[in-house]
Image (tube, grey):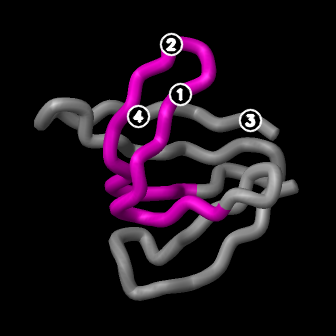
Amino acid sequence: MVDYHSNNKRKGKKMTIENKTYQVGDLFTTQKSGVTGTILAIEPINSNTTRVLLDVDGKERFTTVKF
């Protein structure tokens, strides 16, 4: 289940995955590649998919989270 809440951070989103809430500024690790970065933006695409922009060692990287 994904739950989005508004806030004042970039893109104004939070996301909840399996009772864990992530927001801009949190560390997030991708499931497939195991890359960890700081969340810069959370952009819902639809009810099952979200794009997350990460800062990984100073470089931006998008990842897609499917539910």
**Residue 29 at what x, y percent from top left?**
49, 32
Tell me the residue that label 4 is attached to.
Answer: 62
Q: Quadrant of the C terminus?
A: top right
Tell me the residue that label 1 is attached to.
Answer: 30
What is the chief secondary structure element of the magenta stretch?
strand
- Helix, strand or loop at label 2? It is loop
Q: Are marks 2 and 1 in contact (CB under 8 Å)?
A: yes
Q: Are marks 2 and 4 in contact (CB under 8 Å)?
A: no
**Residue at 66%, 50% in the rendered image:** 45
Which amino acid is tagged 2?
Answer: Ser
**Foreground tag (4 vs 1):** 1
Tell me the residue that label 3 is attached to.
Answer: 66
Q: What separation in Å lies between label 2 and label 4 (alpha carbons)?
A: 12 Å
Q: What separation in Å lies between label 4 and label 1 (alpha carbons)?
A: 10 Å
Tell me the residue that label 2 is attached to.
Answer: 33
Which amino acid is tagged 4?
Answer: Phe
Q: What separation in Å lies between label 4 and label 3 (alpha carbons)?
A: 13 Å
Q: What separation in Å lies between label 2 and label 1 (alpha carbons)?
A: 6 Å
Q: Give the answer, above or below, for where 58 lies relative to 7.
A: above
Which amino acid is tagged 3?
Answer: Lys
Q: Which residues are magenta?
A: 21-43
**Residue at 61%, 23% in the rendered image:** 31
- Helix, strand or loop at label 3? It is strand
- Of mark 4 and mark 1, the one earlier in the sequence is 1
